[in-house]
Image (cartoon, grey):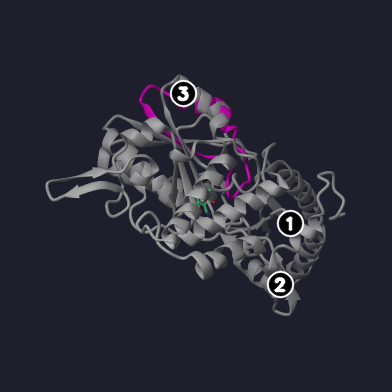
């Protein structure tokens, strides 16, 4: 089943690219179902990072020596690869530590100087804390208010209600592309079109979308798009903020220091232009070399193939979970990514995750950095099985068998 699906890709061969997946945990073969938390890394990413430190390590944009220019070329080369991957210009891509940093950058550099009392920031019920708390901090400091777009019972956004909420006082819409709890895929292209018509600036949290589907930022038509590198097979501490050029030009720097300046005098400083204006200090050079290798790897598989593969795994998992008595799945939107949050009647999700761990199975339990969503679901905590293309149908069967076993112990 794993070697012959319609993508024509040998997925067993692909899985073999991930050294960690051969591990045993508590004497059992590892089943890693926590990719929404962080993704595993293929050998080529590990090698690229390693090779940078072994053969090219130097700082970027500072030294004229050979290693300095090799490091700069490698770092800027990663920016170009990421730009191609997301179909945008590389001088509109700010390299940063992740989605949390990216959204905070927009909050501090775009929103803080602009918003005023009476302005509204629109977010949704399904946001990760990274797309809630920065806006609360901005609201506290500017006097703007936050309004929340609610969900339909299946976990899809209530689009009619959302459009009705896009009133003249809304200055900013901050929305996730894919929910990290429900898996819901939001129709961000349509939503951004509606927002544009009304002059609303859009920030899309692409943390859970970029690893799992083709993302053409230019086609989405947002103002800002944030991405997490470590969820898309890249190293931790890497991420990207794409911003429209007019915003890059108009926004003041977020952090001050080296690299982000053209000239510094005690009387005043001239800032760098383009994305470098927002990249103060030494960046995570080796991390971005690794992320460049990751997007090469993902492109070689094809994001549409990855999406098809994960949808097949999701269908199998969703179907198989029906066999577990008292199990409820949270999030059944018509378009969803391979994230399945669930709870079993009478069982605490931490107990469940702990016993699954003893079976070698890694799932996340808790509130998934989405407290307002969990409050709406009316469930204290859930377990979350989140899949990636390197998972297998056999792992899903092992997971469901383990669920039957541990449920009997806990109920
Ligand atoms: N948004 C969503 C939807 C996420 O799932 C996550 C990571 N759990 C984040 C933001 C935060 O991303 P990062 O780890 O890159 O800061």
Using the image as rendered, state which of residue 133 and residue 109 is in the foreground. Answer: 109
* Label 2, ligand 1: CB separation under 8 Å: no
Residue 29 on image: x %, y % = 75, 72
Distance Cα–Cα, label 3 vs label 2: 48 Å
Foreground mark, 3 or 1, reads 3
Looking at the image, the residue that sits furthest to the left is 267
Residue topped by disc 3: 196
Callout 2: helix, strand or loop?
Answer: loop
**Which residue does the image show at 56% across and 52% down from the upper left?**
292
Give the quarter of the image for residue 272: top left
Q: Relative to 361, is 79 above or below?
A: above
Q: Secondary structure at mark 1?
A: loop
Quadrant hosting residue 62: bottom left
The magenta stretch is 160-189
Q: In this rendering, does residue 367 appear at all?
A: no
Residue, disc 2 = 360
**Residue 380, relative to residue 209: is it above or below?**
below
Q: Is residue 277 left or right of residue 31?
A: left
Q: Local crowd at mark 1 within 10 Å, few (<14), some, or many (≥20)? A: few
Task: Classify 56 as above or below 374.
Answer: below
Give the numbered dot on residue 326. Answer: 1
Circle on res. 355: none
Q: Is residue 179 visible?
A: yes
Residue 27 placement (x, y as % from top left): 73, 80
For the residue pair 8 and 76, the one nearer the viewer reads as 76
Instruction: Of the two numbered discs 1 and 2 on the same chain, state the one appearing first in sequence.
Output: 1
**Position in image of residue 36 (x %, y %):** 60, 55
Q: Residue at x 54, y 48 (%)?
A: 207
| Neighbours of disc 2 within 10 Å: few (<14), some (14-19), many (20+) | many
């Amino acid at each position: 089943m794993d070697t012959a699906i319609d993508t024509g890709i040998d997925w067993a061969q692909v899985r073999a690219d991930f050294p960690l997946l051969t591990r045993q945990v508590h004497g059992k073969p590892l089943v890693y179902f926590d990719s929404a938390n962080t993704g595993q890394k293929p050998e080529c990413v590990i090698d690229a990072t390693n090779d940078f430190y072994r053969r090219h390590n130097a700082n970027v944009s500072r030294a004229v020596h050979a290693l300095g220019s090799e490091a700069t070329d490698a770092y800027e080369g990663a920016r170009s690869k990421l730009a191609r991957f997301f179909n945008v210009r590389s001088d509109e891509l700010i390299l940063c530590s992740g989605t949390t940093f990216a959204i905070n950058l927009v909050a501090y550099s775009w929103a803080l100087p602009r918003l005023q009392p009476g302005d509204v920031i629109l977010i949704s019920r399904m946001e990760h804390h990274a797309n809630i708390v920065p806006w609360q901090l901005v609201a506290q400091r500017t006097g703007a208010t936050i309004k929340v777009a609610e969900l339909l019972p299946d976990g899809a956004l209530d689009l009619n209600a959302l459009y009705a909420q896009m009133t003249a006082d809304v200055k900013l819409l901050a929305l996730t592309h894919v929910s990290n709890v429900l898996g819901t895929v939001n129709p961000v292209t349509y939503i951004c079109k509606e927002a544009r018509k009304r002059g609303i600036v859009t920030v899309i949290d692409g943390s859970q979308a970029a690893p799992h589907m083709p993302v053409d930022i230019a086609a989405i038509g947002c103002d800002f798009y944030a991405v997490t590198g470590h969820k898309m097979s890249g190293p931790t501490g890497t991420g990207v903020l794409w911003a429209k050029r007019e915003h890059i030009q108009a926004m003041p720097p977020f952090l001050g220091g080296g690299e982000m300046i053209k000239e510094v005098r005690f009387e005043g400083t001239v800032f760098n232009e383009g994305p470098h204006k927002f990249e103060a200090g030494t960046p995570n050079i080796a991390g971005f070399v690794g992320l460049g290798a990751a997007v090469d790897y993902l492109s070689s598989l094809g994001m549409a193939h990855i999406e098809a593969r994960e949808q097949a795994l999701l269908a199998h998992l969703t179907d198989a979970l029906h066999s577990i008595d008292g199990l409820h799945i949270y999030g059944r939107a018509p378009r969803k990514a391979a994230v399945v949050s669930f709870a079993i009647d009478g069982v605490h999700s931490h107990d469940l995750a702990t016993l699954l761990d003893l079976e070698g199975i890694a799932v996340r339990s808790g509130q998934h950095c989405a407290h307002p969503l969990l409050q709406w679901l009316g469930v204290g905590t859930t377990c979350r099985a989140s899949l990636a293309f390197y998972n297998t149908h056999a792992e899903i069967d092992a997971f469901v068998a383990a669920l039957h076993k541990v449920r009997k112990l806990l109920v």
